[in-house]
């Protein structure tokens, strides 16, 4: 299993609008792709900015490559994201999942 990590920053005033866009367009566009196993969207406020981190789980680098259009290291954006994001980072990070923790029952 591989975690793909992307990071983006908006102005604080745009955070709710971007979150709505993320939840209605971006994340559904990833969900259900072959080899895609879920993920999380995170947000934190820092002064006048909001930082978003999206972690998605994938079966393999090949599955990521198929979705990302060839180069798995390259960030994938919709055209509309430019209106929210202060900078569109070109690179994402990938990590092999090597351990888990579960809550006791």
Image: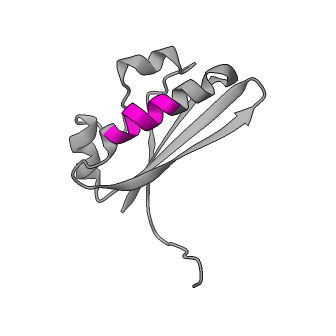
Q: Seen from this angle, which residue lies furthest right? A: 47
Q: Seen from this angle, which residue lies furthest bottom? A: 105
- At 44% from the left and 64% from the top, the residue drawn is 97
Is residue 4 left or right of 33 when viewed as pictured? Answer: right
Span shown in magenta: 20-28
- At 49% from the left and 72% from the top, the residue drawn is 99
Q: Main secondary structure of the magenta part?
A: helix
**Image quadrant in which you'd find residue 47:** top right
Which of the two residues, 36 or 71, is positioned nearer the viewer here? Answer: 36
Which of the two residues, 71 or 59, is positioned nearer the viewer here? Answer: 59
Residue 66 percent coordinates (x, y): 21, 43
Instruction: Using the rendered image of the protein, determine whether residue 72 is visible from the camera's viewpoint.
Output: no
Q: Is residue 100 above or below residue 68?
A: below
The image shows a total of numbered marks equal to 0
Q: Is residue 23 magenta?
A: yes
Residue 82 percent coordinates (x, y): 46, 16
Residue 76 percent coordinates (x, y): 36, 31
- At 36% from the left and 18% from the top, the residue drawn is 79
> Which part of the image, by quadrant, shows the C terminus?
bottom right
- At 54% from the left and 21% from the top, the residue drawn is 85
């Amino acid at each position: 299993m591989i975690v793909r990590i992307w990071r983006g920053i908006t102005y604080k005033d745009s955070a709710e609008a971007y979150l709505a866009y993320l939840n209605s367009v971006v994340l559904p566009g990833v969900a259900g792709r072959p080899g895609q196993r879920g993920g999380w969207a995170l947000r934190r406020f820092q002064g006048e900015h909001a930082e978003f981190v999206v972690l998605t789980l994938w079966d393999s680098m090949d599955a990521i490559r198929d979705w990302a259009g060839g180069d798995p290291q390259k960030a994938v954006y919709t055209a509309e994201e430019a209106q929210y994001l202060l900078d569109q980072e070109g690179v994402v990070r990938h990590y092999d999942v090597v351990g888990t923790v579960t809550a006791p029952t």
